[in-house]
Amino acid sequence: MRRYGKNPDEDDIRVRPNRKGNRPRTHIRPKHEDAEDGMVLTVDRGRLTCLVEGRTVVAMKARELGRKAAVVGDTVSIVGDLSGEKDTLARIVRIAPRRTVLRRTADDDDPYERVVVANADQLAIVTALADPEPRPRMIDRCLVAAYDGGLTPLLVLTKSDLASADKLLEAYTPLGVPYIVTSREELESGDAADRVREFLNDRVTAFVGHSGVGKTTLVNALVPKDRRRTTGIVNAVTGRGRHTTTSALALPLPGDRGWVVDTPGVRSFGLHHVDPSRVIHAFPDLEPGTENCPRGCTHDANQPECALDAWVAEGHADPARLDSLRRLLATRERREGD
């Protein structure tokens, strides 16, 4: 076998010819300076429907993005055929940094993080007061995910004609979460949509909730021109609805006053990805009190050195706020059904 020294640049070195006649591969990626920005509206089996200057464009992710995936709400840069005509396909070459991220895991033991929606301003947590019964632990988990991801929560309670909302609201009033209570009659008449729309104007709002709580019915009332399939079927044995929305979809509110993102019904909301230390940021009245907490303090009621008890005792915050914080932090360590 022939060996070369430090300087192998010799005339007799054999170079393999390029049979295909194409250019050699390079690690230098094109800048795509002519790319146009768009917003991802929905994702379906590797195809992303995007809004580009008022046109709906179907695109796929460029290989150079690697494993980085675009989700609904992402601002992306697109090249290729941007006409939006049938059977055309563009290419997403860049994904802009996200302002906010709503994430979840399948359960608390699953390290695989799923991004539900990007760049949403608000999270509307839709819960039925009956049929199916409300699950406060699910609400708590959604609140933690909202606070962690930088979204403002909104509690939407449906089917008030079947049960009162008073007991449920007692647990969330100290958190200062805005809420709306609606009935089935209001949903059918459109009155509920008019009241909910006041909280959505000029915002991007993601809707989450169990199947059967009326989430998609409400979204259809908010955006009547883009109706999605709904379900009123709730299993009499399990008390759970059947999934009908299978992919997240961003829809514009009438008059371009904002966006709603309808997401598939969820049966669990894992918080494996959440760092409990970030939840305190959603409590500005309590956060200054953590300065005297020991390093790594979990702010648990059973931790005697937590400075929040003294902070509340001195009158800086309402005791109910501290109870709410600790309840939310406990959801990270407690399974949803407990």
Image (cartoon, rainbow, N blue to C red):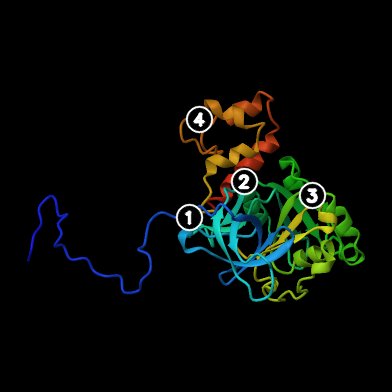
Q: Amino acid at mark 4?
A: Glu
In front of the other: 233 or 229? 229
Marks 1 and 4, how far apart at CA: 55 Å
Q: Secondary structure at mark 2?
A: loop
Marks 1 and 3, how far apart at CA: 48 Å
**Front position among marks 1 and 4:** 1
Q: Residue at x 66, y 57 (%)?
A: 39
Kindly check if marks 3 and 4 are in contact, taking CB atoms under 8 A apart as contact: no
Q: Secondary structure at mark 3?
A: strand
Q: Secondary structure at mark 1?
A: loop
Q: Residue 5's spot in the image, x, y percent? A: 9, 53
Residue 99 is labelled as: 2
Q: Amino acid at mark 2?
A: Arg
Marks 3 and 4, how far apart at CA: 35 Å
**Front position among marks 2 and 1:** 1
Q: Residues within 10 Å of mark 2 (few under 14, many from 20)?
A: few
Q: Residue 16's spot in the image, x, y percent? A: 23, 69
Q: Residue at x 62, y 26 (%)?
A: 311
Kindly check if marks 2 and 3 are in contact, taking CB atoms under 8 A apart as contact: no
**Front position among marks 3 and 4:** 3
Marks 4 and 2, how far apart at CA: 35 Å
Q: Which of the marked residues, 1 or 3, is nearer the chain's N terminus?
A: 1
Q: Which of the marked residues, 2 or 1, is nearer the chain's N terminus?
A: 1
Q: Residue 161's spot in the image, x, y percent? A: 87, 63
Q: Residue at x 69, y 25 (%)?
A: 315
Marks 2 and 3, how far apart at CA: 24 Å
Tell me the quadrant of the picture where the C terminus can be found: bottom right
Q: Is residue 275 left or right of residue 230?
A: left
The residue tagged 4 is 305
In front of the other: 116 or 326? 116
Against 115, residue 321 (above or below) is: above
Q: Which of the marked residues, 2 or 3, is nearer the chain's N terminus?
A: 2
